Amino acid sequence: MTQFDVRKIRWQMDLSQVRFAEELGITQPTLCKIEKGDCAIEKYEDKIKKVFSSWKENKIKTLEQEIEYIKSL
């Protein structure tokens, strides 16, 4: 995972640095350093993957519910 992957994940989740940092349990300045490449990602990589995976699962469930609703119309 690269600094660009972290930024892309945050953008896909449509979160500010502050909100994404809260989700990760880190400070916004630390996230900023990660996204700039000034801080090692390895320490945070598992947490980032876990948060993103959880977000994707929730997004899929929401979309499935929307599809079911539309089918019922």
Image (spheres, rainbow, N blue to C red):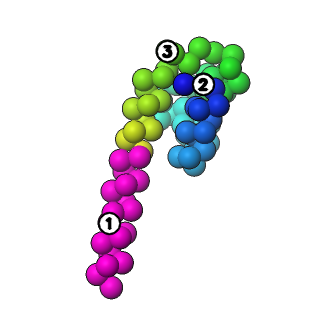
Residue 21 is drawn in which quadrant?
top right
Q: Can residue 28 be seen in this view?
A: no
Q: Is mark 1 on a helix, strand or loop?
A: helix
Between the C-alphas of marks 2 and 1, the distance is 33 Å
- Residue type at tag 1: Gln
Crowding near the residue tagged with mark 1, few <14, some 14–19, many ≥20 C-alpha atoms within 10 Å: few
Please give the residue where the numbered disc 2 appears in the rendered image. 2
Crowding near the residue tagged with mark 3, few <14, some 14–19, many ≥20 C-alpha atoms within 10 Å: few
Front residue of 20/35: it is: 35
Residue 7 x, y percent position in the rendering = 62, 35
Residue 9 x, y percent position in the rendering = 55, 39
Please give the residue where the numbered disc 3 appears in the rendered image. 43
- Residue type at tag 2: Thr
- Residue type at tag 3: Lys
Q: Which of marks 3 and 2 is nearer the N terminus?
A: 2
Please give the residue where the numbered disc 1 appears in the rendered image. 65
Residue 63 is drawn in which quadrant?
bottom left
Residue found 49% across the figure and 15% down from its top = 43
Given the current orientation, which residue lies at the most extreme bottom position? Answer: 73
Residue 60 is drawn in which quadrant?
bottom left
Q: Closer to the observer: label 2 or label 1?
A: 2
Between the C-alphas of marks 3 and 2, the distance is 12 Å
**Horizontal relation, residue 4 to residue 72: left or right:** right
Q: What stretch is highlighted in magenta?
A: 56-73
Residue found 54% across the figure and 25% down from its top = 1
Asked if residue 57 is among those painted magenta in the image, a careful observer would answer: yes
Asked if residue 71 is among those painted magenta in the image, a careful observer would answer: yes
Residue found 47% across the figure and 29% down from its top = 48
Q: Closer to the observer: label 3 or label 2?
A: 2
